[in-house]
Amino acid sequence: MESWNQNPSDAVRTHSPDGMNRRIDAHVERCVRDLAERGDRRAISDYLDRLERAWDLNRVVTVAASAVSLVGVALAPRNRPGWAVVGGVAAGLLLQQGLFGFGPLATLARAFGARTRREIDLEKFALKALRGDFERIPREGGPLARANAALVAAQCC
C-alpha cells in the first residue's frame, strides 16, 4: 500500500529515518487489517481503549528527560558534578524537543516504537471508521478494501 500517513508539517516524521516511519506505519496497517478481518466490534472497542491510554512521543520524551534531569539534580550535590552536566544536557534536549518538535530524544524514543499523538489518532480514526462510527466507509468489499478505506478516511479527521 502507498503510504497513507503523509504530512509534510509533521516535524518528527520529517526528521525520522524513513525505515522507522515505515515500520510504525506497517504496525498500524497490520492492526487495522487484523481487526478488519476479525470483524469484531468489541475487539475494536477494546483496542481503541488501549490507544486512549497510549503514551505519545512527547509524553515519553518529557518524562524520560525530566527523570534524568531530576537524577542529575539529586546526585550533583553529593560531590558528583558530572551528574549536573547530565541533568543539564537532558534539560537542553527537552528544550530542543519543545521548541522544534523533534530531537535526539525523539529519535531514540521512536526507535523503541513511540508514536506521535497524530499517528496514534490516525489509527484511532481508522478503527472508528472500521467499527462504523463514520458513514464514509463502504460496506461492500472485503476486509482489506474496508481497512484501506478506513485508513484513507482517517487522514481527513
Image (cartoon, rainbow, N blue to C red):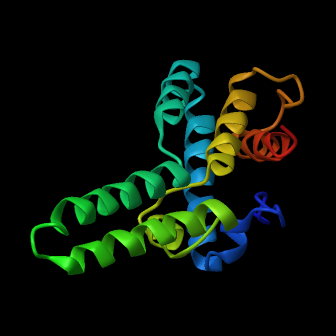
Q: Quadrant of the N terminus?
A: bottom right
* Horizontal and vertical percent position of residue 63: 40, 51
Vertical comparison of 18 with 34: above or below: below
* Horizontal and vertical percent position of residue 74: 19, 59
Residue 7 lies in what quarter of the image? Answer: bottom right
Vertical comparison of 39 with 62: above or below: above
Q: Quadrant of the C terminus?
A: top right
Residue 70 lies in what quarter of the image? Answer: bottom left
Identify which residue is drawn at 33% across, 62% down: 69
Q: Residue furthest left?
A: 78
On the picture, is 97 further left or further right than 114?
A: right
On the picture, is 9 further left or further right than 121?
A: right
Q: Nearer the viewer, residue 87 or 39?
A: 87
Identify which residue is drawn at 46% across, 61% down: 113
Identify which residue is drawn at 62% across, 43% down: 32
* Horizontal and vertical percent position of residue 31: 55, 46
Q: Nearer the viewer, residue 40 or 4?
A: 4
Total numbered badges shown on the rendered structure: 0
* Horizontal and vertical percent position of residue 72: 26, 66
Q: Nearer the viewer, residue 58 or 156?
A: 58
Identify which residue is drawn at 26% across, 61% down: 73
Q: Nearer the viewer, residue 38 or 65?
A: 65
Vertical comparison of 107 with 154: above or below: below
